[in-house]
Image: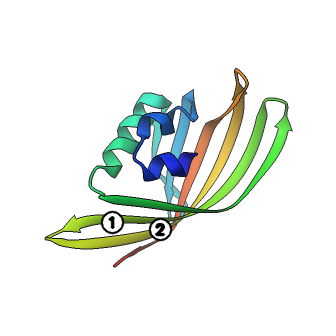
């Protein structure tokens, strides 16, 4: 659902996939470039980062989940992301390879993302 909500820019629903005190680490070149703490920070950053794009597309690839116990799990998910924006009257497309490393918690019967390490592995602009 994360990618579906990202593509439709439904950031409110997207952020509800995180625990209330969820953490998102943005990682470029194997270094954390910034960290978001809690749903409010995550919502503000996700909403702001998508404003300039007229189209967002995620192609989700393989995903693995390893259950630690009844209320905790770890997962890895791969995504191919295409972002389209207007620049000087022309469409500019960027493509990214992203690997999400997640820690999940089961809260009130729902699996939520407690921590996400978003590894931006490569980036191309056309």
Instruction: Looking at the picture, tell me which residue is in the foreground, 80 or 40.
Output: 80
Mark 1 touching mark 2, by CB under 8 A? no
Secondary element under disc 1, as helix, strand or loop, is strand
- 60 horizontally vs 120: left or right: right
Which mark is drawn over residue 84?
1
Quadrant containing the C terminus is bottom left
- 3 horizontally vs 125: left or right: right
Picture residue at 58% right of the left edge, 49% below the top: 117
Secondary element under disc 2, as helix, strand or loop, is strand
Q: Residue lying farthest left? A: 88
Quadrant containing the N terminus is top right
Residue 93 at x, y percent in the picture: 34, 72
Asked which quadrant contains residue 64, the reply is bottom right
Picture residue at 62% right of the left edge, 37% below the top: 113
The residue under label 2 is 96
- 93 horizontally vs 39: left or right: left
Picture residue at 55% right of the left edge, 46% below the top: 2
Question: Within 10 angstroms of label 2, few (less than 14), some, or many (20 or more) residues?
Answer: some
Q: Residue lying farthest bottom? A: 126
Residue 57 at x, y percent in the picture: 45, 61
Q: Residue lying farthest right? A: 69
Q: In this view, does 17 lie above or below 92?
A: above
Question: Within 10 angstroms of label 1, few (less than 14), some, or many (20 or more) residues?
Answer: some
Question: Could you tell me how far apart the alpha carbons at marks 1 and 2 are, in whole angstroms?
Answer: 12 Å
């Amino acid at each position: 659902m994360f990618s579906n909500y990202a593509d439709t820019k439904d950031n409110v629903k997207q952020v509800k996939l995180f625990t209330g005190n969820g953490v998102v680490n943005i990682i470029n070149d194997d270094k954390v470039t910034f960290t978001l703490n809690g749903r409010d920070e995550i919502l503000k950053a996700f909403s702001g980062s998508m404003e300039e794009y007229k189209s967002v597309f995620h192609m989700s690839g393989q995903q693995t989940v390893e259950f630690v116990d009844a209320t905790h799990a770890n997962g890895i998910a791969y995504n191919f992301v295409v972002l389209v924006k207007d620049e000087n009257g022309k469409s500019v497309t960027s493509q990214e390879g992203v690997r999400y490393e997640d820690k999940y918690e089961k809260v009130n019967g729902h699996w939520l993302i407690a921590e996400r390490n978003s590894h931006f592995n490569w980036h191309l602009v056309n």
